[in-house]
């Protein structure tokens, strides 16, 4: 719907009003009947008071106040927010009226019809909603935002909506506002608005004159037509919202991106079917037409895919395009609020799972059989109440997403993962699955800890180049100092010519670090996932192997999670990541993981002198020297000692700027570490803590510890944690035998 007449100065009786260049920037009504009016003056509000009276018909709704607004560059801005009077829409011809407070001189009058919409030629959407009751604070916020453009809704197929919701969750976790622009039919939006506002900060709707067409592989060179008002509205909404990036999140929206000139950066959330589309065209000429058309649409756009395999496939027909990986699941799981699962609900997904739940004999058991047509909101609500999830191979995309979210939330999953091809629902399969469920119900049901994830919202935003100006500023420093640091690190690597530098977009001091590396090593060895967001000296990460680079230095920064995410991106590109500052590497993490549980059930000894007879594993901290030690911690890079099972060192100690010769695995001492999983870092300076963590890694269930260590307060918390992990600690008072009794 639209206004029935253009807005402009009107005559009141025989007296002409003054023309201040006032026009409507936005006029919209929320679902609760609140009117939001934004006005602007082309004369910069010259001569206008700081308040203007707002009326609908004869009903006074208060005053719009002058304030700095996101669209203030176009002139003075006014904002008004008030509840509409009862029966306003039933009036024969409701009119929006803007008057001066003194004397009541009318500046603007416009007829209204149904929900308010912008005036002729204005830029805003047909309707606007926010989840926050303070609409003025939300709309006028100075926080940067990401505008997500799509014609899909929460009620769409879960395979279509889950990636959009996942993107919104990732953007929110990275610190940006989510502004969602929906284009298409209005009735579907009204029915799903509450669910939509739970995932988006601001929702705009734009009505289309005709349904949007999608690109078809049957006509690969033809692109669907785009309505001009749609593009103009999106550009203006992005400007008014302080938008850092516009992301097309559905296939139909991708072709709108190609029509947006200038303005903020552009991104595209690509589905698996879209990335694989050109491959599915077997005739060479139509395939090349399709590739040429899609390249034109996505030129200058940062592309988002859900896994590294799709990024490799995308590189075959868009080799130079900057890209980022956003797996479906981690962001949604991080955004889910943990709930006490006291309801003991068992969630079944898939026809075979539904049949199996009917065979389970458990009186009073609460069972939810989620249909395959369920949406994302229903799935998340069900998971927050689930004791465990029962899946069958016919669970489809809903089951695949449920399995990922359940694992991230520490909810057990029973059954087989969904298969991509249809699976017949046989009675025998249901019986087997029911037996698994009954076995689970009769067994102890320990709480599962959510596995640690290396995914980071900030790392994703970094890869995409989503940062404000203050985060783009380079850290101060001297090129000489950075060159010295780089030279020191390169001297510890055997093949300097095969070492490059990987810079993350938004990395503080990244440009300065790149300049120092170029001065030291020359051009052509600085890389980034998104070079345009980093430095003119950077090249796409995919070119590293072509330049003869096999290892890349990375600046891990203060966050271990961000460091691991950066390392994972390098590994996915076939490169070995190497931290710029002293720190444990990916090689170290793999070395520790391979040793997990190799001495399960054994007794370990940490102490001096002769080893007790009961000890099957001998652990030797850095200041001691025991013959035939299984685990040895090095005191420096030149320490010649080696352990029979494991040789380790504190990699983020300044002593180890130069890495000791192999075999040796490094661990980090980090304040944010939790527990005693040495692969993720240990807390505390005491060297015995690392030895205890090594004993837990090897699977030892009993540790003999010298009595003097029990008197050290720095070990009290660690010893308690070992007890909680099921490891018995016994003190040794002599050099040969332990006392009876555990701690």
Image (tube, helix red, strand yellow):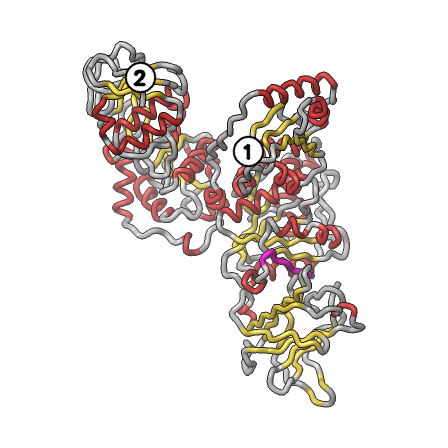
Q: How many marks?
A: 2
Residue 695 image-quadrant placement: top left
Q: Position of residue 192 (x, y in %)?
A: 69, 50
Q: CA distance from mark 2 to mark 1?
A: 47 Å
In the orientation shown, which residue stands out farthest toward the bottom? 14
Q: Main secondary structure of the magenta part?
A: strand
Q: Nearer the viewer, mark 2 or mark 1?
A: 2
* Residue 129 included in the magenta stretch of the image: yes
| Residue 604 - label | 2
- The mark that comes first in sequence, 2 or 1, is 1
Viewer-side residue, 355 vs 665: 355
User: Image check: 611 left or right of 394?
Assistant: left
| Visible residue check, residue 525 | no
What element does badge 1 sit on? helix
User: Image check: 549 left or right of 334?
Assistant: left
Q: Which residue is mark 1?
A: 312
* Residue 523 included in the magenta stretch of the image: no
| Visible residue check, residue 735 | yes
In the orientation shown, which residue stands out farthest toward the right? 92
What element does badge 2 sit on? strand
- Disc 1 crowd, CA 10 A, few/some/many (<14, 14-19, 20+): some
Q: Is residue 436 above or below residue 93?
A: above
- Disc 2 crowd, CA 10 A, few/some/many (<14, 14-19, 20+): many
Image quarter in which the N terminus is found: bottom right
Q: Is residue 318 above or below residue 245?
A: above
Q: Position of residue 299 (x, y in %)?
A: 58, 47
- Residue at position x 53%, y 32% from top? 410
Q: Position of residue 42 (x, y in %)?
A: 59, 75
Viewer-side residue, 250 vs 284: 250
Residue 596 image-quadrant placement: top left
- Residue at position x 32%, y 39% from top? 521
Query: Which residues are the magenta region?
Result: 127-132
């Amino acid at each position: 719907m639209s206004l029935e007449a253009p807005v402009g100065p009107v005559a009141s009786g025989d007296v002409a009003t003054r023309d201040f260049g006032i026009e409507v920037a936005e006029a919209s009504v929320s679902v609760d009947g609140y009117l939001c009016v934004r006005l602007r003056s082309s004369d910069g509000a010259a001569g206008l008071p700081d308040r203007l009276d707002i009326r609908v018909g004869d009903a006074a709704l208060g005053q719009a106040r002058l304030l700095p607004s996101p669209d203030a560059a176009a002139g003075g801005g006014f904002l008004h927010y008030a509840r509409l009077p009862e029966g306003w829409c039933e009036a024969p011809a409701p009119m929006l009226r803007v008057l001066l407070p003194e004397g009541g001189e009318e500046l603007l009058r416009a007829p209204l019809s149904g929900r308010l919409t912008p005036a002729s030629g204005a830029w805003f959407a047909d309707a606007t909603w926010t989840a926050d009751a303070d609409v003025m604070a939300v709309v006028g916020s100075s926080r940067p935002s990401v505008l997500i453009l799509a014609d899909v809704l929460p009620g769409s197929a879960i395979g279509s909506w889950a990636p959009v919701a996942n993107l919104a969750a990732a953007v929110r976790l990275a610190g940006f506002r989510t502004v969602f622009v929906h284009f298409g039919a209005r009735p579907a939006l009204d029915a799903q608005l509450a669910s939509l506002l739970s995932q988006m900060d601001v929702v705009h709707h734009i009505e289309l004159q005709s349904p949007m067409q999608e690109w078809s592989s049957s006509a690969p060179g033809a692109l669907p037509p785009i309505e001009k008002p749609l593009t103009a509205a999106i550009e203006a909404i992005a400007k008014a919202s302080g938008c850092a990036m516009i992301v097309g999140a559905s296939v139909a929206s991708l072709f709108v991106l190609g029509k947006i000139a200038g303005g903020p950066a552009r991104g595209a959330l690509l589905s698996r079917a879209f990335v694989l589309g050109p491959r599915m065209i077997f005739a060479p000429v139509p395939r090349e037409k399709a590739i040429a058309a899609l390249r034109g649409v996505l030129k200058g756009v940062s592309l988002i895919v859900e896994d590294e395999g799709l990024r490799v496939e995308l590189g075959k027909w868009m080799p130079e395009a900057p890209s980022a990986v956003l797996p479906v699941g981690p962001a949604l799981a991080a955004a889910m609020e943990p709930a006490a699962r006291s309801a003991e609900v068992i969630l079944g997904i898939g026809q075979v799972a539904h049949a199996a739940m009917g065979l389970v004999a458990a009186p009073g058991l609460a069972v939810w059989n989620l249909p395959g047509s369920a949406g994302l909101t229903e799935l998340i609500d069900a998971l927050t109440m689930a004791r465990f999830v029962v899946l069958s191979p016919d669970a489809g995309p809903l089951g695949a997403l449920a399995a990922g979210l359940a694992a991230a939330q520490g909810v057990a999953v029973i059954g087989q993962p969904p298969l991509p091809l249809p699976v017949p629902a046989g009675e025998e399969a249901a019986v087997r699955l029911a037996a698994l469920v009954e076995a689970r119900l009769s067994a102890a049901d320990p709480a599962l800890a959510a596995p640690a994830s290396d995914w980071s919202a900030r790392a994703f935003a970094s890869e995409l180049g989503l940062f404000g100006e203050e985060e783009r500023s380079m850290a101060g420093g001297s090129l000489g100092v950075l060159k010295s640091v780089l030279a020191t690190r390169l001297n510890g690597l055997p093949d300097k010519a095969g070492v490059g530098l990987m810079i993350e977009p938004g990395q503080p001091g990244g440009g300065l670090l790149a300049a120092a590396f170029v001065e030291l090593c020359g051009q052509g060895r600085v890389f980034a996932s998104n070079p345009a967001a980093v430095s003119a000296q950077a090249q796409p990460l995919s070119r590293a192997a072509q330049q003869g680079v096999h290892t890349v230095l990375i600046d891990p920064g203060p966050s271990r999670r961000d460091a691991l995410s950066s390392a994972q991106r390098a590994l996915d590109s076939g490169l070995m990541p190497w931290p710029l500052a002293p720190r444990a590497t990916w090689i170290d993490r793999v070395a520790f993981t391979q040793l997990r549980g190799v001495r399960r059930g054994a007794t370990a000894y940490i102490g001096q002198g002769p080893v007790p007879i009961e000890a099957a594993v001998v652990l030797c901290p850095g200041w001691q020297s025991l013959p035939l030690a299984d685990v040895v911690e090095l005191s420096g890079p030149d320490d010649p000692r080696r352990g029979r099972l494991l040789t380790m060192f504190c990699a983020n100690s300044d002593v180890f700027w130069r890495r000791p010769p192999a075999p040796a695995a490094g661990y980090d001492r980090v304040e944010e570490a939790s527990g005693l999983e040495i692969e993720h870092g240990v807390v505390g300076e005491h060297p015995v803590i690392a030895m205890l963590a090594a004993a837990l890694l090897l699977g030892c269930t009993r540790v003999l510890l010298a009595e003097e260590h029990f008197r050290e307060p720095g070990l009290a918390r660690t010893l308690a944690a070992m007890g909680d992990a099921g490891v018995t600690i016994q003190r040794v008072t002599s050099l040969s035998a332990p006392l009876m009794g555990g701690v």
